[in-house]
C-alpha cells in the first residue's frame, strides 16, 4: 500500500491522481491533501478520502472548512493552512509518495521539504524545477530518492531512458503540439483574445498552462525541466512541433537508435506510471495504433514564439535567470488573462525582466523566493507602465476625435 500526499489536490493533476487512487484502492491510500482555495472541492475531498491532514491556502478558508467538517461530524481530520500547512502535508510521517501539483512557486517550499524528508516525489509542477531545480535535484541525489516526472513529456523521456544509460544519450526530443496559433500569422497575434488562447487543440489544462502552451513558454519550461531532471545540457534538448501530440517525447542514443513513447492523451497514465514505478500494472487506458498513420513534425519558429528562445537563454545562464523567467511569465500571463495586456506583449515583458535581473547562483530556497519576489515586482511594474501608456494613447485619440 503506497501512502500518498497530494500538493494541489483540487487542480486537474490532483483530481486525476485521486481518480487513479480510486481505481486501485488496494494499492493507494490518500493520507494528506493540500487543497488551495477551492473550499467546496476541499470539503468534498475531505469527506470522500478522510485524510489525516488537509491544508488550505488561506486561514479563513481553513476555518470555514473546519466548521463544515464539524457540522457533519467528520472528526479526526486536521485542517491547517498556508505554506506551513503545505509543508506539513508534504512531510507527514505516514506519507511515502508526494505528488507535487501546485501551480507556480507556491508549492516550492513544500516540494523541497518533501525531498529533504526523504519522500519519493512525483513532480507535476514544472515551475519548481525551473525556479529551484538545481537545489531540488541536488537534495534528491543526497537522499538517494528518485524524482519521478508526471508531466507527460518528461514521463515519456523517463520511460524511454529505461532502454539505455544516460551516458548513451545523444539527444532528447520534446514534442510540442504547437498550441492553437501554430498556423496563425504573427501579424495577427496582437488581436488574439483570451478565449482563443484558452482553446487548446489537444489537452484540457489549467488557464495559465494553456496560455503558456499557446506562447510555447510551457515547452521552454519543459526544456529547463529536462536539463535538470536528466542532467543534460540545453544543446542536447531539442523541441519538435508535433500537432497530433501522439508521440510525447523521444530519446536518441549515440548509436542512432531513437526510442519514442506514445499513448492516450490522458494524464492518469503518467500519474499511474509514477505511482507504481518501477512496476507497470494493468490499466484500461488503450491507444489505437491505427492513429499512427499520419504524424507531422516540424521545427519551432523561434521568431514567432520568442518565449521558447528566452527559456533556452535563461537555462544557459542558470541561477536567478530561470527564476525570473517563471516569475515574469506568471505575472504577464495573469495580466493577459485579466485583459491588461495583449497576447503579443507577454514575451516582451518577460524579456525586459530577464534583462534587468542578474544571473547569480542561488544557494537556498529563501534566496530563490527572494529572487522570485524581485522579478514579480519588476514584471508588475512593466505591466502597469504598459497600462498607463495604453490609457494615454486612448485618451489622446479620444481628445483628437472630439
Image: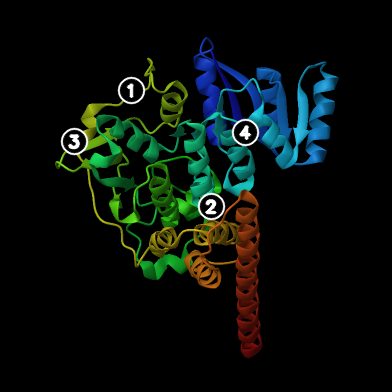
Can the viewer see residue 267 in this picture?
yes
Kind of element beneath mark 1: loop
Q: Position of residue 16 (x, y in %)?
A: 52, 28
Between disc 4 and disc 3, the foreground one is 4
Q: Which scheme is used to colour this image of the protein? A: rainbow
Q: Position of residue 79 (x, y in %)?
A: 77, 28
Between disc 1 and disc 2, the foreground one is 2
Tell me the quarter of the picture where residue 36 sits.
Answer: top right
189 or 271: nearer the eye? 271
Of the residues under marks 1 and 3, which one precedes in the sequence? 1
Question: Mark 3 sits on what residue?
Answer: 293
Tell me the quarter of the picture where residue 119 sits.
Answer: top right
Question: Mark 1 sits on what residue?
Answer: 286
> Quick check: 179 above or below 113?
below
C-alpha gap between disc 1 and disc 3: 17 Å
Tell me the residue at 56%/61% (across/down). 328
Tell me the residue at 77%/24% (across/down). 78
Can the viewer see residue 198 in this picture?
no
Q: Are marks 1 and 4 in contact (CB under 8 Å)?
A: no
Question: Mark 4 sits on what residue?
Answer: 10
Tell me the residue at 49%/45% (across/down). 126
Binning the other alpha carbons within 10 Å of mark 1 as few (below 14), some (14 to 19) or many (20 upward) gives: few
* Numbered circle sitting on residue 268: none
C-alpha gap between disc 4 and disc 3: 37 Å
Kind of element beneath mark 3: helix
Between disc 2 and disc 3, the foreground one is 2
Q: Are marks 1 and 2 in contact (CB under 8 Å)?
A: no
Question: Mark 2 sits on what residue?
Answer: 131
Furthest toward the left, the residue is 255
> Quick check: 44 above or below 228?
above
Q: Are marks 4 and 3 in contact (CB under 8 Å)?
A: no
84 left or right of 165? right
Amino acid at each position: 500500500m503506497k501512502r500518498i500526499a497530494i500538493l494541489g489536490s483540487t487542480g486537474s493533476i490532483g483530481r486525476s491522481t485521486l481518480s487513479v487512487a480510486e481505481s486501485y484502492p488496494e494499492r493507494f491510500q490518500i493520507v494528506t491533501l493540500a487543497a488551495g482555495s477551492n473550499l467546496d472541492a476541499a470539503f468534498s475531498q475531505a469527506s470522500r478520502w478522510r485524510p489525516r491532514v488537509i491544508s488550505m491556502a488561506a486561514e479563513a478558508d481553513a476555518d470555514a472548512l473546519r466548521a463544515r467538517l464539524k457540522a457533519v461530524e467528520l472528526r479526526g481530520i486536521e485542517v491547517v493552512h498556508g505554506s506551513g500547512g503545505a509543508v506539513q502535508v508534504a512531510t507527514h510521517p505516514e506519507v511515502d509518495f508526494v505528488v507535487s501539483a501546485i501551480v507556480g512557486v507556491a508549492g516550492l517550499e513544500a516540494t523541497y521539504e518533501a525531498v529533504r524528508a526523504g519522500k519519493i516525489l512525483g513532480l507535476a509542477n514544472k515551475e519548481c524545477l525551473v525556479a529551484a531545480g538545481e537545489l531540488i535535484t541536488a537534495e534528491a541525489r543526497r537522499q538517494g530518492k528518485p524524482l519521478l516526472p508526471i508531466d507527460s513529456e518528461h514521463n515519456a523521456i523517463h520511460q524511454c531512458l529505461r532502454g539505455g544509460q544516460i551516458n548513451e544519450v545523444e539527444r532528447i526530443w520534446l514534442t510540442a503540439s504547437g498550441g492553437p496559433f501554430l498556423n496563425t500569422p504573427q501579424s495577427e497575434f496582437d488581436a488574439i483574445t483570451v478565449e482563443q488562447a484558452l482553446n487548446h487543440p489537444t489537452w484540457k489544462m489549467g488557464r495559465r498552462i494553456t496560455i503558456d502552451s499557446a506562447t510555447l513558454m510551457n515547452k521552454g519550461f519543459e526544456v529547463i525541466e529536462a536539463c535538470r531532471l536528466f542532467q543534460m545540457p540545453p544543446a542536447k534538448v531539442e523541441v519538435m512541433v508535433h500537432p497530433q501530440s501522439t508521440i510525447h517525447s523521444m530519446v536518441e542514443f549515440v548509436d542512432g537508435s531513437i526510442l519514442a513513447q506514445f499513448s492516450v492523451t490522458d494524464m492518469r497514465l503518467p500519474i499511474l506510471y509514477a505511482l507504481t514505478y518501477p512496476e507497470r500494472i494493468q490499466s484500461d487506458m488503450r491507444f489505437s495504433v491505427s492513429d499512427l498513420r499520419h504524424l507531422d513534425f516540424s521545427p519551432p519558429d523561434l521568431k514567432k514564439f520568442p518565449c521558447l528562445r528566452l527559456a533556452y537563454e535563461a537555462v544557459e545562464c542558470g541561477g536567478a535567470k530561470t527564476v525570473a523567467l517563471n516569475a515574469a511569465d506568471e505575472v504577464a500571463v495573469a495580466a493577459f488573462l485579466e485583459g491588461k495586456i495583449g497576447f503579443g506583449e507577454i514575451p516582451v515583458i518577460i524579456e525586459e525582466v530577464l534583462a534587468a535581473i542578474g544571473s547569480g547562483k542561488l544557494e537556498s530556497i529563501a534566496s530563490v523566493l527572494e529572487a522570485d519576489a524581485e522579478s514579480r515586482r519588476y514584471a508588475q511594474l512593466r505591466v502597469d507602465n504598459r497600462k498607463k501608456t495604453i490609457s494615454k494613447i486612448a485618451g489622446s485619440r479620444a481628445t483628437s476625435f472630439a
